[in-house]
């Protein structure tokens, strides 16, 4: 392999593919980046055995071929190069890099040792609007579990029925659910790793000219997303996802409308005093206002009153402040609609004019609740 490539293009391919690399690799080869050429472009591929990412960038190809070297080492090297044209050449199983007086040689491993990348078949691909899909994922993925002890909950469920696809994620303490126009012509039900989907969101932001995301099953157990010059291929998680219908409340006794910024400031203030008390903060709804409070024997007590439009019985309910803050950080609207039925049932957060989204947080049982 002999190519000439702009430093910025090479760095783009390396930094994007480098994001998925594991800090605790199962195999040494998964710390490598596979570089290959095809039709006047350079392809960079990395994998963590769950997810594979492939990025294409423009290059002048003098000789076709490939090289497989340390992703971290090559990225750190390219970061030091000037923003000029670099020359890459496969030499003795490794890679030679030169650019404006800089010269380096990196050891490599045989390219055939790199795990094979599943083939994406053009005829099997379906497409969905990029911005709609990425926005939906941003509303959902933060609620997925990070504990590998419950692998099913580390993914987001995609359920397509008729003209609607429902995307949901839960860690057992909270649930985010968003409905979008059907992604596929056929009904589907699958769970996709949240970490791979977060990479789809990042790639959607970076691939600014792309209008659509293409996706397809590469075989019975893997799913491929393509946006612009980036492909993300990930395994589908096996198992039975929780019955979401049983989690979502069908009625409420109290509804309140909040200004999101006022609510965020109040929750942040209360959270300071909740750190030594399992992050528990309390909502008290009465007289067209909500008092958000927290206290502990070590740091004292904090109360913030937030004006609100309240319909119904009012009452008290307690939540983990961390869950509230993560929800509010990902919620895009200026107003938040909140529904509750007593202190022991889930609290529901919605958009005011769009019923396609909801977020549920399980309450914390307190001595007075």
Image: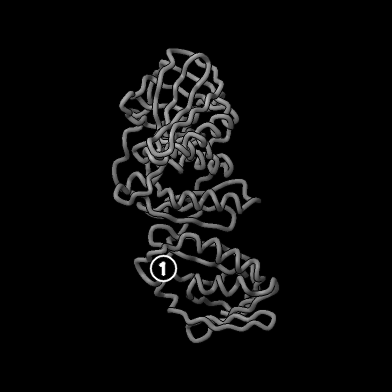
Closer to us: 323 or 68: 323
The image position of residue 189, as x and y in percent, is 37, 40
Q: Local crowd at mark 1 within 10 Å, few (<14), some, or many (≥20)?
A: many
Residue 363 coordinates in the image, percent (x, y):
36, 29
The total number of labels drawn is 1
Secondary structure under the numbered disc 1 in the rendered image = helix
Q: Which residue is mark 1?
A: 30
Q: Residue at x 48, y 31 (%)?
A: 302
| 197 shown above or below 69 | above
Q: Position of residue 173 (x, y in %)?
A: 36, 36
Residue under the point 61% across and 53% down: 207
Q: Is residue 159 above or below residue 251?
A: below
Between 43 and 15, the one lying in front of the other is 15
> Within the image, what quadrant is residue 8 found in?
bottom right
Q: What residue is rendered at 58% in x and 58% in y? A: 229
Q: Nearer the viewer, residue 189 or 38?
A: 189
- Residue 368 vs residue 34, the one in the foreground: 368
Q: Is residue 77 above or below residue 305?
A: below
Q: Quadrant of the C terminus?
A: top left
Quadrant location, the N terminus: bottom right
Task: State whether residue 227 appears in this view.
Answer: yes
Q: In the image, residue 166 lies at what x, y percent?
A: 44, 35
Asked whether residue 323 appears in the rendered view, the answer is no
């Amino acid at each position: 392999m002999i190519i000439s490539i702009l430093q910025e293009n090479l760095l783009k391919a390396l930094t994007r593919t480098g994001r998925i690399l594991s800090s605790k690799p199962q195999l040494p080869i998964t710390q490598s980046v596979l570089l290959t050429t095809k039709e006047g472009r350079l392809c960079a591929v990395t994998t963590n055995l769950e997810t594979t990412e492939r990025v294409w960038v423009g290059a002048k190809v003098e000789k076709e071929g490939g090289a497989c070297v340390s992703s971290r080492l090559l990225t750190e090297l390219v970061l030091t190069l000037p923003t000029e044209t670099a020359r890459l050449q496969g030499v003795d199983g490794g890679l030679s890099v030169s650019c404006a007086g800089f010269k380096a040689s990196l050891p490599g491993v045989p390219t055939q040792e790199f795990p094979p990348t599943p083939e994406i078949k053009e005829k099997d691909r379906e497409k969905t609007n990029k911005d709609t899909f990425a926005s939906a994922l941003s509303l959902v993925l933060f609620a997925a579990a990070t504990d590998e002890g419950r692998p099913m909950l580390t993914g987001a469920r995609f359920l397509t029925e008729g003209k609607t696809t429902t995307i949901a994620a839960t860690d057992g303490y909270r649930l985010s659910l968003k409905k979008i126009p059907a992604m596929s012509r056929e009904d589907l039900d699958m769970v996709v790793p949240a970490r791979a989907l977060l990479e789809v969101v990042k790639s959607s932001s970076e691939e600014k000219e792309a209008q659509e995301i293409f996706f397809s099953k590469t075989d019975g157990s893997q799913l491929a997303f393509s946006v612009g010059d980036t492909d993300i291929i990930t395994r589908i998680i096996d198992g039975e996802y929780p019955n979401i219908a049983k989690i979502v409340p069908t009625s409420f006794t109290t509804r309140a409308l909040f200004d999101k910024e006022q609510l965020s400031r109040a929750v942040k203030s209360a959270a300071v005093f909740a750190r030594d008390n399992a992050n528990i903060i309390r909502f008290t709804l009465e007289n067209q206002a909500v008092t958000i409070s927290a206290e502990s024997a070590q740091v004292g007590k904090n109360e913030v009153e937030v004006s609100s439009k309240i319909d119904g019985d009012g009452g008290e309910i307690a939540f983990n402040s961390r869950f509230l803050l993560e929800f509010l950080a990902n919620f895009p609207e200026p107003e938040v609609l909140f529904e509750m039925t007593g202190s022991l049932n889930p609290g529901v957060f919605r958009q005011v004019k769009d019923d396609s989204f909801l977020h549920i947080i399980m309450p914390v049982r307190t001595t007075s609740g």
